[in-house]
Image (cartoon, grey):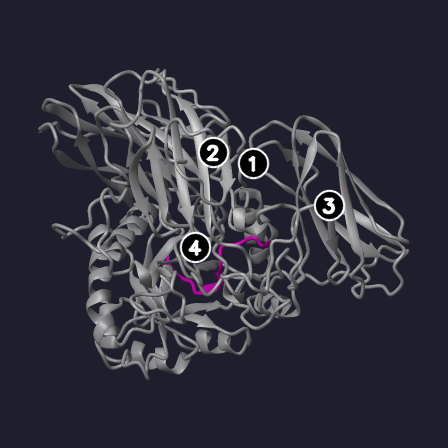
Amino acid sequence: MAVSTLRKTVAGVLALVLAPLTVVSGTAGAGTTAGAGTTAVNRYRTVTDFDAGWLFNYGDASGAGGASYNDGGWRKLSVPHDWSIEGKNPPANPFSQSAPSTGRGGYLPSGIGWYRKHFSLAGVPAGRRVSLEFDGVMANASVYVNGTLIGTHPYGYTGFRYDVTAAAKLGGDNVVAVKTDTTSQPASRYYTGAGIYRDVRLIATDPVHVGQWATHVTTPNGNTVHAETTVVNEGGAAASVSVQGVLSDPGGAALPAVTTAAKTIAAGASATFAFDVPVSNPKLWDLANPNLYSLATTVLVGGAAVDDDVTSVGLRTLTFSASTGMSLNGKSVKFQGVALHQDLHGLGMAAPQRAVQRRLAQLKALGVNAIRTAHDPPSPAFLELTDRMGFLVLDEFFDVWTQHKYADVGDYATYFNRTASAPTGTPAVPGASGSVPWYQVDTTSVVMRDRNHPSVAMWSTGNEIRDPIATRTPLLTRMAAIAHALDPGRPVTQALFRPADSGDVTGATRTLVDVFGGNYRPDEVIQAAKTSPARAGLFTEMGTDTSAWTTVRNNAMITGLFLWTGAAYLGEADGLWPRVEPDFGLLDGVGTVRPIGYSWQRTWGAPTTSPPATGTTANRVVLAPDHSSVSTDVDDVSYVKATVADSSGRVVTSSSAPITFSVSGPGELVAVDSGSPVQETFRGPVRKAYQGVAYGLVRATGAGTITVTASSAGLTLGTTTLTGTTAPFVPCSGSCD
């Protein structure tokens, strides 16, 4: 998913300007939202959007990591990019019953893909530290700069940042090359995508700077912001350093600055600073009013500002009790949750933020207030949306630990206990010395990166882990210790598999987790939660039978549930060919509400909606965009719905007629889609209607009127217009969309 426009300083080209920037509305850097329409941005470090201007090659390319490699024939594109969902030769159908990914991976292609990008650092003065930060690369990413291998990162769901100063040419042209490798298959129980499928940015800092993800913000009592940060001195001499914090309210007004006492940091050393910002009349973050403040943490050397880190802040208290369950700002609340995999159907894993926002808004309309990121960490852009829209998030680490669930030779069990290669691209693991396994590196990465998001309610260390309890106990102990060391205020849980049979109800697991979670065994969760010492419980995964909500409501210590699932997803379809997905989801893959979705809407007390009226005799195609204006920003896309309708405009659900989309004017067809679970290409102009509906996904290529038409043999042509703009996409706040 592309990062929010609110975090972008430069779109398309690298333009590093080292003069301090001002705080402006609607412009972005590494900073995050201070409120709807107001953004605090970095003033001293330079954070540059690095998504545009890449070259791509499907398959291996010998020597492609080299600086002088001839990439003139490679395909030009922007990232985020998922090459698996489009296949080797789009719009040809990428699905194959013989794909090594098998039905578990959605019968979609895997293998090696290469990316290269040429860029200039001519504007960066000597002495600056330069880093490349990737939010997620699927998978086994090997990163080269000017022919030098910088590092290799196996896990596709965690971010990493490499300091490339030594390999880069600050005064001239450079090339970065990234090899992605998903050859080892099957690699998961569900579709994972392939390539640089999340955002990339380039960061230039003073040698004295805030460390990677080092700022930690908490709001212990709802009217105080407590911040801790670590400053690193990578210069050649000791420095006298202090830190200044400026908190801005949701409207953008700055509160009085707070400055710490100075500390001397030796060359090559670091120091931690802490400060408190009192907030009078705080505007709290909650599900209905997700108010966001912004904290700018500035590093001062000898009193002069040299670096800054900008953090979004939601003032809220979230507590868990064995007797009363969960409370948000002192009010009882329960997770009305759904689990979500990360693919967006025809967009794959590289979905624009507008598409993700659309899905979250559709789920909120059904009464959903919480998301479980099944079964891996989300992108930063996803958490920006859950912060802004008012969701709680169960942030999950892994689907497997040391044992494969199936014969999935390429899944994370391959790397879980393997010694991490240096550099890891992530901060040091707390309490560790010497080499560490990848699972500790990735746990540290997730917690440090995500801990400032007010929407993140809990950490889940894993899903239905099949290792025996004797193996799991020391691993769970270590993961919980890392999470508690880095983020003492959030509880740790685990989505346990048959907890009574596996020894978790009476064994060590019950006391190692802060909230006892379990899948499909509500009685066992209740038993474990009530056993002394009692703790809150959570139904981490349940089927869609609405009777489960009665159990949640009647047991105060149960904090809620997460349904399997919120929306349909690709993969987990072994033996189902030509189907490429199972039947789960309150929504289908394009957001159509299924009957069970309406049932949960009523159960959760959300305002009721109804399915559209149906007809029997098709005679026309009716087009309707979900947004009448669409931008050139890669974060934006308009879902143009094509309905096979009767003369009164009612949908003919029996129709599977092929719909041909065409776009004229300054727009392009990004993908075609429908809710069909059967294999069919998402690229090209044609998509068969599923239950009478298909979609053309359109993005602007410039400003002006975009005309979209949809035709089908024997039916009256459908047409609609969109307004193309060059304005950046700005995500919404609250229910939205």
Numbered circle sitting on residue 183? 4
Q: Earlier in the sequence, mark 2 or mark 1?
A: 2
At horizontal 45% and vertical 37% (from top left) the residue drawn is 115
**Residues at marks 1 and 4, CA–CA distance in whole angstroms:** 28 Å
Residue bearing mark 1? 634
Q: Residue furthest front?
A: 62
Q: Earlier in the sequence, mark 1 or mark 3?
A: 1
Mark 2 and 1 residues: CB-CB less than 8 Å, in contact?
yes
Residue bearing mark 2? 51
| Residue 331 highlighted magenta (yes or no) | yes
**Residues at marks 3 and 4, CA–CA distance in whole angstroms:** 30 Å
Callout 1: SS: loop
At horizontal 30% and vertical 37% (from top left) the residue drawn is 149
Question: In front of the other: label 4 or label 2?
Answer: 4
**Residues at marks 4 and 2, CA–CA distance in whole angstroms:** 25 Å
**Amino acid at circle 3:** Pro
Question: In front of the other: label 2 or label 1?
Answer: 2
Q: Earlier in the sequence, mark 3 or mark 4?
A: 4
User: Mark 4, residues whose alpha carbon is within 10 Å: few (<14), some, or many (≥20)?
Assistant: some
Residue bearing mark 3? 685
Residue 373 lies in quadrant: bottom left
User: Mark 1, residues whose alpha carbon is within 10 Å: few (<14), some, or many (≥20)?
Assistant: many
Q: Earlier in the sequence, mark 1 or mark 4?
A: 4
Tell me which segment is drawn in magenta.
328-345
Q: Is residue 250 visible?
A: no
Point out residue 36 in the picture as x, y percentages from the top left corner.
50, 36
Callout 2: SS: loop
Q: Is residue 536 visible?
A: yes
Q: Earlier in the sequence, mark 3 or mark 2?
A: 2
Residue 124 drawn above or below residue 160: above
